[in-house]
Every structure is written in structure tokens, then in C-alpha cells.
Amino acid sequence: MHRVLIGVLAMAAIPSALLAQVKDDPLAAYDAKIKPHDRRHWSFQPVVKPVLPKVKNAAWVRNPIDAFVLANLEADGWKPAEPAPSAALLRRIHLDLAGLPPTLAEQEAFLKNPAPAAVDKIVDDLLARPTHGERWARHWLDVVRYAETAGYERDAAKPFVWRYRDYVIRALNDDKPFDRFILEQLAGDELEDANADTMIAAGFLRLGPWDDEPADPKEDRFDQLDDVVQTTSLAFLGLTLGCARCHDHKFEALTMHDYYRMVAVFDALHRPQNGRTELALPAGTRAELAKEKWRDRQLGLLGRTQYALQTGGNPAAFLEAARVSLVQQFPDLPRGYFLHESSPKASDTHLLLRGKAARPGPKVDPGVPAVLVKDQPPFLAPDQKSTRRRLTLAKWIADPKNPLTARVIVNRVWHYHFGEGIVRTPNDFGVMGAQPTHPELLDWLAHWFVDNGWSLKKLHRLILASNTYRMSKTWNKEYAQVDPDNQRLWRFPYRRLEVEAIRDSVLAVSGKLNSKMYGPWMYPEVPKEALAGSSDPDKIWKAFDEEEASRRTIYAHIKRSFVVPLLETLDLCDTTRSAEKRLTTTVAPQALTLFNGEFVERQAKHFASRLVREAADDASKQIGLAYRIALCRQPSAKEEKVLSAFLLREREQLEREQPKLDTATRARLALEQACRVIFNLNEFVYPD
């Protein structure tokens, strides 16, 4: 087998001095391919804090972010756009941090004092609200390919997987340091202080799709490991390591050896299952798990004793009392959806020729990509429970000296605030990835982030405190001719809200948003026509419960084989793999869904009822209130005139078509149509 491998490798240029070593260690040939120039790629360099640049317009610089952006603009004599209008900025910040528009009370309070310091206080307030975690958790769920079913033909629900979603929401609301966030998701069960939360966090490794009846179980096993390796390298390191399963990466300094080193890290993991059925596991501290295990043994003994008594004709009411007592004294631990290591001894991992499970090559030890290290990190010795290989990897990734980790996460945060990252390929920091538009700013942010305890909330505050973030979206024809994609940040970018923020905003505006947090998923309303193609339409989706379905969209059931049409039409990401960014398409079904869909029609009725309650039957007041609630501003004179005329035409048409309707009913029905119009204004989904 080694001879075959050497023959394959002979196609690559191997220095003659290494040939002897290759004969003894065929894997050495892979590492020999990594050259000094490969390690000089910008993202593989240590993060060094750059000196702040000097600028002419120092008064515009509110924090170091502005200095880097302004220096880049001033180099060509450019100027940043003027500040955003106060009301627009308020709505931008609320939608950005919480995914919901500001209330009337919040608008009134801010507009009395729209000073920059007041904006800072609003940012602090929004970061402290539980709605922040609900908004930003969905961003992370995109990256980690979160869905609640397995995919493939049967697409069965994953038991208790929603607890991972809740973990992410809580972690972000608690401002869990990102380095700890990494440790818990990769090795939450291997930590010394492991508990229910950290074990549930390790569900990250089990989120991908899986085939519950594969044609080739061995091949499927490596497909599952491939999913873990790919997602880990993309999410935390911004590396496309998954491309090296069958051959060395065609463009990056990543070899098959690198790939299978990472496979070896995760190879001890197993999927708890009973045939085709997925199983959940108890989650808790080691002491709690030991107690539950002891309790279950006792219950087993009681069960056998009870059976013996019953078959012998003796009463068994007493061993039952003991059973109840045991369960009350040691209640069930929460169940979590995660993989587990059944033994501290890992089986051997082999490099697979052509990536095929049926063609094992030489044995591979756990490790990390050679291009990132001079020497492989020493792996921890196994303990009594696990190999601790994942813990070693997690600590290496979370090490402040790792050149990629901090850069990748601050770039993701920047991407979600501005619509594009400083590196516009958030999952690819390699040679084929985009070059950073502001490399010094990226490194300054990465260095600052680590120095500030890996705090995501502090990073949000820093970005939103900058004048760069608070610019208007004013177009500049001259600048656009040179920089049409706004890479130099001469204005704040114009972008559409994600479907979650659109749907949640509609619910908030209509007054029907259910703020219930956490727990099992809810089922949004789905048109009957969408279910008609299913072989089992009565079971694939639960009956509509409006109160439950009015919860925030992050709690909507994400079924891989059947995506809610509203979410799919408005560009929910592909949940089968890590999604670095949402696509933003513009297609006819979006307009049809938002104007004629059952969800918007129902919410328009609720919105109209709210306007009648709060503005009585005064059409002018209703229009003004509708604009303030939905768009955070008063309508212009022209807008009020146009919408007033629309209401009049609708009432007159109803009078002709349904003369038996009373005046109040005609007015309400006309107002519902006006509310549909407001939900479909560009400004509603493309804020400020």
C-alpha cells in the first residue's frame, strides 16, 4: 500500500534529500510540499497591532475604526458621507442589534435627545436585552449549518436539537467569551468543568445532515466526519480544508495529510442511535451523570425484583414506591443532541486513497494544518472518559497566537453589521479568498478583540460607536464610478433585511409578536398547496396555532426537506453546509409572497385593528401612526396625500361591490389594504 502511495506522490516534486525519509514515512512527503512562501500568506501571519494612521479631518474620528477608514478615503481626496438622519439611525441600530423596529416610546425618547452619547446608551440597552441573542444567534446558526431534521429521504427530526439553538442565544446574551464559546462547541464534554450547557454546546459537531440508511456504511461514516472537518475549518479558521479529502487542495497549501490529521481528531466520536432512530443523551456534570447512571442501575434491579414478585403471585406495590422515590430523588437530566466518545482509546485513522473508505492508506496521527505551525501542537493524553483530542484542537484554535481565529470572527461581526466583511469571503481566508479591503483595520480589530477578553458585545459597541457605522447611505456618483461596491466605505451600505428580521418586524408592527423564548420549535403557517405534494401532508407539519406561530422566526421549525415557503422565498440559507452569507435575490415570488401571502394578509388585519384602537377612525392620524410604527418616521405630505387617496378609492370600490357593508367595515377593510401596502414598501425591508 505504501508503494502505491509513493507512486501517486511521485507526480509532485519531492526534494531528493527527503526520499529516504519518505520511504520510512510516506506522510512526510505531504508536509514537504509546504514551502516557506506558503506560510507568508497574509492571514497566516501573526496578528500585530498596527499604528493608527494620521488623518486630516481628525474631528470625524470617533474611535480607531474611523481613523483607518478615513485615512483610506483621504488618500484620494474623498470624504465620508454625512451622518445618517436621527430616526433612520435609530431604526438601523434596533434592526441590527435586536431584529425589531423601535417602539413609539423609544422613538419619542430618542428624538428628544439624538446626541451621539444618547445613541451609545441605546446600543448598550439593546445589547442588554434578550432580543439581541435571538437576533444574532441566527447568524451563527447559518455558519454552523443548523437545522432540526436529518435530511435525506426520511428527514427525521433530531431529538432535542433545539437546545443547541437555545445555548447559542444564551451564550450571546451572556456575552460568553468567544474563546470559551469555541472550547464548549468543539469539546464541551471533555472540559474539566463540563456541565449540561457545555455538553449541549458540543451538539455543534452533530448538526449536519446524515443518511439513516446509507448504501455504504463505511463511506457514510467518513461523510459524517467530512461534515465535521469541513464545518470546523470553515467556521473557526476560514479554511476550505474539506477540499483536501480526495487529493491535495488544488489552490491552497492544504494537503490530504492535513485533512486526515483533522479527521483523526474527531474519529473517536460516535452517533448515538438505535438502528435508524437518532438518540439523545443525558447532559450534566460528571457527578450528575454518575448519579443518573447509578439510579438507572437501581431501577433495573427494582424492575427485575418486581417481575419476580409478580410472577410468584406476591404483591409488588412496595418495590413501586421505591421506584417513585428514586426518580424523585434523582430526576432525569436534560437530554442533549451531541456525539460522544465511548472510550478514551481512539481507533486508528488512515489516510484514504482517493478519499474512499475502501482504500485505506497509512495511519495518520491527529494534528492541524502544517502551513499554520512550525511544529504540531502536543496533544493531551486521554483521561478516563475520552481521548481529549478535540480539547487539544479547541485550545489550539482558541489560542490568542492562532493567526486566523480572531481575524475570522471579527470579520464575521463586521460582515453582519455592514453587509460585507472586510474580507468578503468570510469562510475563506486562504489564497483563493478575497483580499481584505482594510487589512490594517482587520488586524487592529482582531488584536483589540483578544485584548478585550474575546467579548462580542464590546466589539459590537466599538463598531456601532464609530462614525463609519453612523454614516448615511447617500449616493456619490463620482465615488461610485471608481468604487461601485463601496469597498472603501464612503457611505453606509444599502441592503435588505434577512427574512427573520422581515417576518419579526411585521409581527412587531402588527402588535402580535409573541415574545416567548426558548424551548421546542414552533410551526409557522404553511399554505395547504405547499403540503399537497407530500406523501404524508397531515403529519409533515403541525396544525396552525397562531399564538405559537407568532413567536420570533428563530424558533420556526427548520426542516431540511420542506422549508417554509416564506423563508425559502426570502433567501433562507442552505442548511446542509456552512453558510458564510445570505444570498439576496430579487424575484417575482418575493413580491407575491409579501403582498398576497396569508401571513402578510393576516398581519395587515391585525395592524389595521391596532391603528383603529390607537388612532380611532381619523384616516390622517391612522396614516401618520402607521408610518411611525412601521418606518420610524412621519409620512411626507406627498405620501399622506397618495395614501389618503388610496383609502378613499378602496372605500368607494367596496361601496360599489358590497353595498350592504356598513361605513365602519368599509373603512376597516380599506385600511387593511393600506397596511399591506406599507408592509410592501421598499423602506420596510431595506431600512433607511
Image: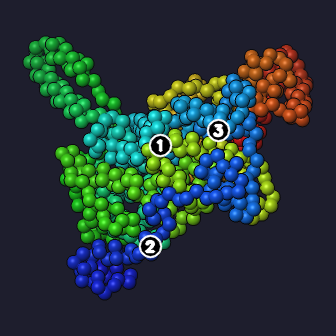
Secondary structure beneath label 2: helix
Q: Nearer the viewer, residue 73 or 245?
A: 73
- Dot 1 or dot 2, earlier in sequence: 2
Q: Position of residue 275 (x, y in %)?
A: 30, 44
User: Marks 1/2: CA distance?
Assistant: 31 Å
Q: Which mark is residue 194?
A: none
Q: Position of residue 165 (x, y in %)?
A: 46, 38
Callout 3 environment at 10 Å: few (<14), some (14 to 19), or many (20+)? many
All told, the count of numbered labels is 3
Residue at disc 3, secondary structure? helix
Quarter occupied by the N terminus: bottom left
Occupied quadrant, residue 632: top right
Q: Position of residue 381 (x, y in %)?
A: 21, 53
Residue ID at (29%, 73%): 27
How many C-alpha atoms fall within 10 Å of the one at disc 2: few (<14), some, or many (≥20)? some
User: Furthest residue to the left?
Assistant: 312
Query: Pointer 1: what residue?
Result: 455
Q: Amino acid at mark 3?
A: Ile
User: Which mark is nearer the camera, 3 or 1?
Assistant: 1
Q: Amino acid at mark 2?
A: Asp
The residue nearer to you, when weighing 25 against 437, is: 437
Q: In the rendered image, which residue does mark 2 sit on? A: 38
